[in-house]
Image (cartoon, rainbow, N blue to C red):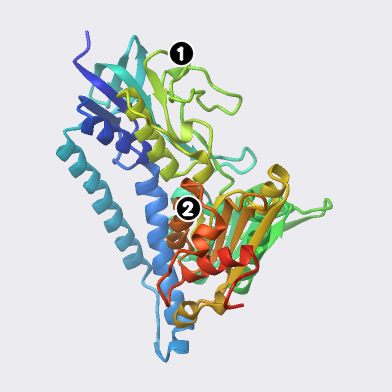
């Protein structure tokens, strides 16, 4: 017999799980959330939040050491205190995870500390090393996130060949860092250590970095990062890696079959993430999985087992915290009989390098493939007054619209604070706006978002400032 009965039990307290639990409680459902480790999951503890803290700190260090003099600010004898930087990161993570505990208390969500496992018949078994408990619920939501992909030929050792988790906590700046994978995680962490003094090389299997993003913008981002000192080797892969005398000896295969070896202090493998669904008892309970190990769900996030749902990184789609949050809310609202919904055409994506690359909707390549005739408007930050005041004129805004209807199909921003600017484009696309709608919207002057307005004007060749 179950120790306690709930309306909803959420397994996993990452962004998708804890948000789902809070929303369920708001909708007057008796709710519990199962999590063994710190609340917040990968995102708050070893992902989104700590990486952005280090990106911000490392960028300030870089500016103080090399670019502040352009503003007339002369900073002499700038030095790095890595221990303090890491302490600040840990402090912010602690505050954020503590905030979730406070939200659970406020909304009367019960935190069941332990590892959750489906035991069948609407029962969740929770084990925490001290014993096991069984809890029943009419609705069980699986939100256990994802884990870093480990390459068979480059197994993690936690010290020299590492995942993003270890790369967020190096105790000293590696003299040489090789990053396997030119996606967001690899580029962001590569940028952190490059700014702090490491020689960074990025190896990418595909012909472009940030695969899947607009090619023109990806090429511009690569050029910007190369100017910062990061080197790239595209259409290449690492064959072997061996630790000798405290350093990693890596054999690389380049395009055309050429092979050579390199030696580095740390090898970061950042080739993606996979669904974390092992040990859940899901397969044993009859939950259906796809050929990539993700849980199969319908439009309402229901699995093949009645009363069991799944959201976030364990199902198909981009592995992004905000996507998981929206799915958590939608799943719970649908359970409550409300009209929960996620618009997958407007999921924003951001690479938090400097400049940032932020994107929503279709790339130019996909737009031409799916729609055919499109119009493209571009506006460079070099022509934006606010960008000049920030000494950040690199990059541009690129807008893609249907040539027949003028409906915005995609917006891509490469530049300072691009992540903050993107929300306007997401909102516009959510309401099926045309490029003209954005072009006729008044923007404060001087601001970076004026570049969005100008790109919208440029869709019809009516930009004012270029």
Q: Name the residue under label 1.
A: 284
Front in this rendered view, residue 451 or 416: 451
Q: Is residue 9 left or right of residue 152?
A: left
- Pair 1/2: label in front: 2
> Could you say which quadrant of the image residue 376 lies in?
bottom right
Front in this rendered view, residue 263 or 145: 145
Q: Residue 95, how many percent across, how many down? A: 24, 53
Q: Is residue 101 above or below residue 142?
A: below
Q: Residue 168, how many percent across, how many down? A: 43, 55
Mark 2 crowdedness (10 Å alpha carbons): few <14, some 14-19, many ≥20: some
Q: In this view, does 167 lie above or below 30?
A: below
Residue at 41 percent across and 51 percent down: it is: 48
Tell me, yes or no, if residue 402 can be seen here: yes
Residue at 56 percent across and 78 percent down: it is: 383
Front in this rendered view, residue 445 or 386: 445
Q: Is residue 246 left or right of residue 389?
A: right
Q: Which mark is residue 146?
A: none
Residue at 43 percent across and 21 percent down: it is: 302
Q: Name the residue under label 2.
A: 428
């Amino acid at each position: 017999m179950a120790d306690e009965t709930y309306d909803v039990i959420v397994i996993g307290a990452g962004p998708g799980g804890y948000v789902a639990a809070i929303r369920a409680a708001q909708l007057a459902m008796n709710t519990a959330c199962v999590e063994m480790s710190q609340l917040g999951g990968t995102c708050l503890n070893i992902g989104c939040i700590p990486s952005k803290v280090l990106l911000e700190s490392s960028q300030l260090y870089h500016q103080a050491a090399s670019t502040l003099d352009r503003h007339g600010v002369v900073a002499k004898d700038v030095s790095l205190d890595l221990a303090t930087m890491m302490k600040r990161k840990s402090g912010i993570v602690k505050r954020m995870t503590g905030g979730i505990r406070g939200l659970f208390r406020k909304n009367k969500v019960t935190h069941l500390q332990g590892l959750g496992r489906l035991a069948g018949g609407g029962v969740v078994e929770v084990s925490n090393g001290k014993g096991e408990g069984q809890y029943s619920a009419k609705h069980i939501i699986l939100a256990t996130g994802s884990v870093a992909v480990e390459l068979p030929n480059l197994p993690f050792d936690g010290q020299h060949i590492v995942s993003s988790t270890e790369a967020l906590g190096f105790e000293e700046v590696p003299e040489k860092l090789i990053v396997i994978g030119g996606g967001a995680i690899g580029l962001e962490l590569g940028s952190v250590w490059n700014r702090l003094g490491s020689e960074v090389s990025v190896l990418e299997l595909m012909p472009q970095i940030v695969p899947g993003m607009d090619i023109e913008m990806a090429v511009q981002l690569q050029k910007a990062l190369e100017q910062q000192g990061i080197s790239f080797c595209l259409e290449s892969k690492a064959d072997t890696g061996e630790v000798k005398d405290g350093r990693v000896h890596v054999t690389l295969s380049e395009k055309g079959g050429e092979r050579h070896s390199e030696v580095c202090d740390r090898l970061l493998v950042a080739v993606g993430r996979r669904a974390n669904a092992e040990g859940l008892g899901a397969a044993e309970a009859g939950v259906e999985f796809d050929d990539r190990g993700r849980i199969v769900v319908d439009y309402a996030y229901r699995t093949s087992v009645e009363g069991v749902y799944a959201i976030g990184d364990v199902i198909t789609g981009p592995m992004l915290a905000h996507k998981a949050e929206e799915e958590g809310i939608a799943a719970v609202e649908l359970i409550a009989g409300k009209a929960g919904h996620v618009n997958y055409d407007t999921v924003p994506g951001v690479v938090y390098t400097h400049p940032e690359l932020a994107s929503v909707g279709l790339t130019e390549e996909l737009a031409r493939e799916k729609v055919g005739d499109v119009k493209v408007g571009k506006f460079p930050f070099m022509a934006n007054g606010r960008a000049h005041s920030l000494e950040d004129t690199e990059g541009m805004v690129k807008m893609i619209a249907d040539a027949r209807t003028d409906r915005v199909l995609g917006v891509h921003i490469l530049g300072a604070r691009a992540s903050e600017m993107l929300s306007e484009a997401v909102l516009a696309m959510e309401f099926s706006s045309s490029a003209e709608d954005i072009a006729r919207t008044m923007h404060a002057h001087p601001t970076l978002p004026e570049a969005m307005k100008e790109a919208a004007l440029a869709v019809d060749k009516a930009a004012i400032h270029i």
